[in-house]
Each structure stands twice: as structure tokens, then as C-alpha cells.
Amino acid sequence: MSGEANGLTIDLDATLDRGHVGEVGVPAGPELLAFTNAVELGGDIDGTRAAVAGVIGEEATIEAAAIVAIFNGLVRVADGTGIQLDAGVFAASIDERQRLGIDAYAGAANSLGVAATSDEPDARTVVDLFR
Amino acid sequence: MNAIETTHAHVAANVAAAGDWLTGHDRVAAWREARDAETNETDRARRSAISPNAVPGHATPTIEVVHRVASDPGRLTRTWADEQIAALGEETYTELVGVTAIASVLDTFDRAMGRPEPTIPEPIDGEPARVRPDDVGDVGAWVSQTTGPTRANVSRTLSLVPETNRLWRQLVDTFYSRGTEFMNLSWDFPLSRPQAELIAARTTALNECFY
């Protein structure tokens, strides 16, 4: 994530732990995670959305709903077209993918042939977005 | 109405028009099937099965593609996709993936905002463009995509179907990337960049998306 650029130390393990809705190092993180889980897994959408709005305001809440929504599309175009992980990201995320169990996802098979070179233009920039 | 709401309404109206290889009627039907996948018994059974192959698929490749992409995208495989592409052609397959993704975005946004399920628009008459771009080829994905330089593979997923891709990119740009602001890790929007990436990471993890 973009934590470092904003002076934040983010707990990536907790972020990716579907059962965790507590602090992760992002302002309003618990409310945003509870809202995301409610939309994705079924739950109190109205209540969690109201909690988000109470912390970050109505306009930011609409943007939060938009992010949940667009990533429902992004995962579908990525997995539906079988794209490979970009080479630079592939190389730079090896340790984190293994530690977080992401390599066990079915979609990992699509990237088995990726040449793990980390010297592609913009590779670091793209990876840094997720730190 | 803000940009997100405006774009949502614009894309919802235009996805009902003829696209690249599908008519408006086909695309509206695909949206209905994508919505049905949320409660469809076959899809529920497949999602809960240890292997999706343990549950027989849907009756036609078109319905199979829409329902699988809508309901269980994290467990799609190249073998499955190759079977559907052999039956449909890679252009139609890709357009169905795109329409399903667009439908998922539109319906998820409405659900997240607590709105009642909106009526799917009536199909708009017209003929598909039926244009295969010249600059597509094998870049390692399951379907042909643009072969030129790209910042990230996810940005060319639907490049084989430009009409569908145009709507899709409008959604992505308005809902998330914000044009050149995407490279600004400290953007000045009501939802901060770390907050946006937090939601993105959790949503991606819940869908078990490797990319």
C-alpha cells in the first residue's frame, strides 16, 4: 500500500486476514474493513457504511463504496483473462506472496512463466503502491 | 451528482447498447445472468465445493462464462477458459468477461450504497462493431491483448474488445485511478490513498485474486 509515502506503518498481514476488522495502521481502517467485509461477504452494509461516514464523511464514503465496487471488476477482468503478474512486481513480491499465502491462489498458475526480472521501467513504482 | 454517480449512470445506460461482438440484447442478458449468479444454486454449490470441477457447469458456454466469472473468479483455470474460448471465440469470451465485470462493479456499488437493486436497462438496438484491433497478440494471457508497452498488464485486459474496454476504462478512471493522480501516493481526495488501497487489498484478498 501507499503507507510509506503517507508516513504510515501498515500491517499487511492483518489487512489480508479476512477475519480481522481491527487496527491496521490506516486512519478509519477498522470501519473501512468492516464495511468492505459486509459488502463482500454479506452483513450489515447500512450499519458499517454509517460507521464509515461518521469517521470520514459522506463524500469519502461514496469513494469507499466505489473502490469496493471497482475492485470487484478488476479481479474479474484479471482472473477472467488470465493475465500474468508483471515481471517487476513478480520479482519484488516473492517473499510477501509466500508469507501471505498468495502463491496458493489458483491464479498463481498464470504467472509461472513470468521472467522474474525486476529492472523493468516503473516496476518499483508499481510495487511501492502496495507498500 | 458527483463524477462517480455520473459515470455509474452513463456506463449502466451504455452497456445495454451493442458492443464489439455482442448485441445490446446479448449484453443485457449477460448482466441479468451475472446478477443471477449471486443466488444461483449451481454457483452456490460450485463455490462451496473443494474443486469447482466437482459441480457440472451451466448449459451453454455463454452462461457458463458469465456465471463463473461472476461467482468464482479466483478459481478459474486456463483449461476451463480454453474450453469456453474454443466454443465462443476469444473476442466474444473477452467481451463476456468485460460485461460481467462491469455489471459486478455497477451492482456492487449500488449494494454498497444501500440502494435497492436497480432495474437493468432495456437493450438498445444496433449492430456490434465487430472490429478486431490490429495491435493485439499473445502477451502471455489467455486471450490476445495489445502488444505495445504498458505500465501494467491489468491495464490491457480488455484491449481485444475496444468498445467494451472504453466503458470499462471510464469506470476504472473515475472509481479508482483518477488519470495521472494514480501515480500520486498522497492524492488529495476525501478518501486518502492508503484508505483506498486498504479497501482494494481486502477486496482482492476476499476474492483470492493473485494479480
Image (cartoon, rainbow, N blue to C red):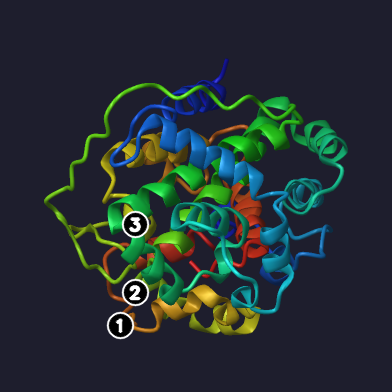
Q: Give the residue type at disc 2.
A: Ala
Label pair 1/3, CB-CB below 8 angstroms: no
Distance (Cα) linking label 1 and label 3: 31 Å
Mark 1 — residue?
A: A115
Q: Nearer the viewer, residue B28 or A106?
A: B28
Q: Nearer the viewer, residue A74 or A21?
A: A74
Mark 2 — residue?
A: A87
Q: Is residue B63 left or right of residue B23?
A: right
The answer to whether residue A11 shows anywhere in this view is no
* Position of residue A114 measured from the top left corner of the image (x, y, whole percent): 33, 80
Label pair 2/1, CB-CB below 8 angstroms: yes
Residue at left offset 42%, top offset 37%: B26
Q: Secondary structure at mark 1?
A: loop
| The residue positioned farthest toward the left in the image shown | B134
Q: Secondary structure at mark 2?
A: helix
| The residue positioned farthest toward the front in the image shown | B59
Q: Give the residue type at disc 3.
A: Leu
Q: Chain of mark 2?
A: A
Mark 3 — residue?
A: B88
Q: Secondary structure at mark 3?
A: helix
Q: Give the residue type at disc 1.
A: Ala
Viewer-nearest of discs 2 and 3: 3
Q: Chain of mark 1?
A: A
- Compared to residue B73, the image places residue A119 above or below, namely below
* Position of residue A23 measured from the top left corner of the image (x, y, whole percent): 81, 58
Residue at left offset 73%, top offset 57%: B41
Q: In the drawing, what numbered circle is on residue B19?
A: none
Instruction: Tell me, yes or no, whether dots 1 and 3 are on the same chain.
Output: no
Viewer-nearest of discs 1 and 3: 3
| The residue positioned farthest toward the top in the image shown | B1
Q: Chain of mark 3?
A: B
Residue at left offset 72%, top offset 51%: A40
